[in-house]
Image (cartoon, rainbow, N blue to C red):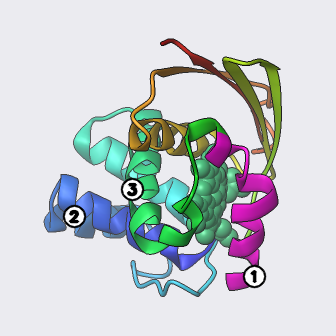
């Protein structure tokens, strides 16, 4: 997983909790990189899973909830870091529909060794979008937070329902998100 994900995670922990808790997370998660990441480096995704686990224990907060909160935070950071992806985009459905064929394609140009998921999007009716997430990594909760971040960014009334489709054994991420306009 690219270093940018790790640096943004640790920055969020510093901001939302404290720099001391960020240090504690690094120490208690037993990761080998000692919390030193560069944006372009690549590190085992298990390290972020371990850091989330440590943060969950230290703050007595549900790990899923922490990953989702990180996804919402990361979305805001993407808006600041990559404004070009948002220019001329009219809303949540349009943006999320462009992740697979545009955003992540450009991400791969920036970071050729990025490990990206796939999203297959369908539109059952004018108010509904379904995104099928598939990855060899278990980051459906991150996707959920990013989706919520997009909805908040465009300030739209859209509900999100997530159904996990993975078998829970292989560490594979598989989930289906149903986004429905509520207003
Ligand atoms: C401007 C917007 C976005 C940018 C710049 C971006 C960029 C990235 C980058 C750099 C990674 C890390 C790749 C790696 O670790 O090797 C990543 C992973 C990921 N992205 Fe995006 N992304 C964006 C939007 C989204 C959105 C809106 C979603 C959700 C619908 C999403 C879903 C994910 C997930 C779940 C991963 C983790 C890897 C996995 O699940 O296998 N991304 N993205």
- Earlier sequence position, callout 2 versus callout 3: 2
Q: Is residue 108 magenta?
A: yes
Question: Which is nearer the eye, 132 or 123?
Answer: 123
Task: Give ligand 1's quarter of the image.
Answer: bottom right
- Earlier sequence position, callout 3 versus callout 1: 3
**Label 2 vs label 3, nearer the camera:** 3
Question: Which is nearer the eye, 18 or 111?
Answer: 111
Which residue does the image show at 48% across and 13% down from the upper left? 183
- How far is mark 1 from mark 2, CA to CA? 30 Å
The image quarter containing residue 74 is bottom left
Give the main secondary structure, helix, strand or loop, of the magenta stretch: helix
Q: Which residue is mark 3?
A: 76
- Asked if residue 181 is positioned above or below residue 92 in the image, the reply reads above
- Asked if residue 109 is positioned above or below residue 115 in the image, the reply reads below
Q: Which residue is mark 2?
A: 14
| Residue 151 screen position, x and y as percent | 47, 36
| Residue 143 screen position, x and y as percent | 60, 43
Q: Is residue 169 magenta?
A: no
Side of 15 where 161 appears, left or right: right
* Cβ–Cβ under 8 Å for marks 2 and 3: no
At mark 2, the secondary structure is helix
At mark 3, the secondary structure is helix
Q: Which residue is mark 1?
A: 109
Q: Which residues are magenta?
A: 94-112
- Asked if residue 165 is positioned above or below residue 108 in the image, the reply reads above
- How far is mark 2 from mark 3, CA to CA? 16 Å
The image quarter containing residue 132 is top right
Residue density around tag 1, few if under 14, some if 14–19, many if 20 or more, within 10 Å: few
Question: Which is nearer the eye, 73 or 170?
Answer: 73
* Beta carbon of the mark 3 residue lies under 8 A of ligand 1: no
């Amino acid at each position: 997983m690219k270093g940018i994900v790790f640096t943004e995670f640790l920055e969020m922990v510093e901001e939302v909790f404290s720099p001391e808790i960020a240090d504690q997370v690094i120490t208690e998660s037993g990761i080998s990189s000692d919390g030193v990441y560069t944006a372009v480096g690549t590190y085992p995704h298990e390290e972020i899973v371990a850091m989330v686990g440590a943060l969950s224990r230290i703050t007595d907060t549900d790990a899923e909830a922490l990953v989702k909160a990180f996804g919402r935070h990361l979305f805001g950071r993407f808006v600041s870091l990559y404004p070009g992806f948002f220019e001329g985009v009219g809303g949540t459905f349009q943006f999320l529909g462009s992740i697979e064929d545009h955003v992540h394609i450009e991400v791969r140009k920036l970071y050729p060794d990025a490990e990206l998921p796939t999203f297959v999007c369908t539109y059952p009716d004018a108010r509904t979008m379904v995104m099928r997430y598939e990855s060899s990594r278990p980051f459906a909760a991150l996707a959920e937070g990013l989706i919520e971040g997009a909805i908040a960014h465009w300030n739209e009334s859209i509900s999100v329902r997530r159904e996990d489709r993975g078998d829970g054994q292989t560490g594979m991420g598989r989930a289906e998100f149903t986004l429905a306009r509520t207003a």
